[in-house]
Amino acid sequence: MGKAKTASKNNPNTREKAIEYFINGQKISPVKIVSGKSSFFGAEYEASGDLVVGPNGMPLPWDRAKQG
């Protein structure tokens, strides 16, 4: 008996469509932010390249930004 054939990760039929995220009608994308000794993934507006900031003026982490 041979090995069972597994599904290829490169099979276009099994790929999921990329999810697009928006804030205030503007598309956002993840960006790595490095600040001093720490780094995290934040968000930027694709059109302008500006960081997405919260009410306190600090960059929002990607997980919070993609929730809208």
Image (cartoon, grey):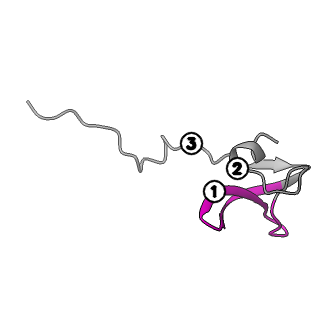
Residue 42 image position (x, y, % from top left): 71, 56
Mark closest to the chain's N terminus, 3 or 1: 3
Instruction: Give the SS element for disc 2.
Output: helix
Which image quadrant: the C terminus?
Answer: top right
Residue 39 image position (x, y, % from top left): 61, 60
Number of other residues with Cα within 10 Å of mark 1, as a class: few under 14, some 14 to 19, many 20 or more = few
Residue 1 or 68: which is nearer the viewer? 68
Residue 64 or 6: which is nearer the viewer? 64
Which image quadrant: the N terminus?
Answer: top left
Residue 24 image position (x, y, % from top left): 91, 49
Mark closest to the chain's N terminus, 3 or 2: 3
Please give the residue where the numbered disc 2 appears in the rendered image.
62
- Which residue is farthest left? 1
Q: Which mark is residue 16?
A: 3
Residue 39 or 17: which is nearer the viewer? 39
Name which residue type carries label 2. Answer: Trp
Q: What stretch is highlighted in magenta?
A: 27-51
Marks 2/1 in contact by CB < 8 Å: the verdict is: yes
